């Protein structure tokens, strides 16, 4: 009888494992490929909408006075950059934090690049793409290694036009030596 009891227990164990395996398979098959992230904590709504809130739904058109062909377009007034590739490609556009030294409107060429250095404001930066000099300061695009984009100190002459790290990666891949940079007001 001991043999038949152990056989029953073994059979039940196999059946239980099969059922658990089947249920696990069903759960994994119906799970989304990219589970939703937990929502960030809710914040109180701002009583006055920000005048600088980005419009994610509507792309910002490349300025008409920015020339033609493959180029980086930097609008000092709009605080925005466009990476304009070959015709027919949708340009990549993103907001930037301008430096305190602004290049004059015109066409420049990327003349220097550095993977990682310390910026003129004393913080570690990466993907530095330099193209001009303004007020005796070298001007270029870069990203802070810590990912922050604070307002520059208005009492210091700095040349770093800052962007997010992801946008810095895109700039680094796009704007190689001698790439055209067009600065518009």
Image (cartoon, rainbow, N blue to C red):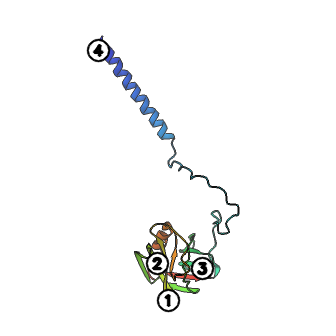
- Are dots 2 and 4 in contact, CB under 8 Å? no
- Are dots 2 and 3 in contact, CB under 8 Å? no
Q: Which mark is residue 3?
A: 4
- Residue visible at 65% across and 69% down in the picture: 52
Q: Which residue is mark 2?
A: 129
Q: Which residue is mark 1?
A: 136
Residue 152 in the image: state x and y as whole percent: 54, 76
Q: CA distance from mark 3 to mark 1?
A: 18 Å
Which residue of the protein is positioned furthest toward the right in this rendering?
A: 48
Q: CA distance from mark 1 to mark 2?
A: 17 Å
Q: Is residue 25 visible?
A: yes
Q: Which residue is mark 3?
A: 76
Residue 138 in the image: state x and y as whole percent: 48, 84
Q: CA distance from mark 2 to mark 4?
A: 78 Å
- The relative height of residue 24 versus residue 107 in the rendered view (above or below) is above
- Dividing the picture into quadrants, the one containing residue 185 is bottom right
- Are dots 3 and 1 in contact, CB under 8 Å? no
Q: Is residue 67 visible?
A: no
Q: Which mark is residue 7?
A: none
Residue 6 in the image: state x and y as whole percent: 31, 17
């Amino acid at each position: 009888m001991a043999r038949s009891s152990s056989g029953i227990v073994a059979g039940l164990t196999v059946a239980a494992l099969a059922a658990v395996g089947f249920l696990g398979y069903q759960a994994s098959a119906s799970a989304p490929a990219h589970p939703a992230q937990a929502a960030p904590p809710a914040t109180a709504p701002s009583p006055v909408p920000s005048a600088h809130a980005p419009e994610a739904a509507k792309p910002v058109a490349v300025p008409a006075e920015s020339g033609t062909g493959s180029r980086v377009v930097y609008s000092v007034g709009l605080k925005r950059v466009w990476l304009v590739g070959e015709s027919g490609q949708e340009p990549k556009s993103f907001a930037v934090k301008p430096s305190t030294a602004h290049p004059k409107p015109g066409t420049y060429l990327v003349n220097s690049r550095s993977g990682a250095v310390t910026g003129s404001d004393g913080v570690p930066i990466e993907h530095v793409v330099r193209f001009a000099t303004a007020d005796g300061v070298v001007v270029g695009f870069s990203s802070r290694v810590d990912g922050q984009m604070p307002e520059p100190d208005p009492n210091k002459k700095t040349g770093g036009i800052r962007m997010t790290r992801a946008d810095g990666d895109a700039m680094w891949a796009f704007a190689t030596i001698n790439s055209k940079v067009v600065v518009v007001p």
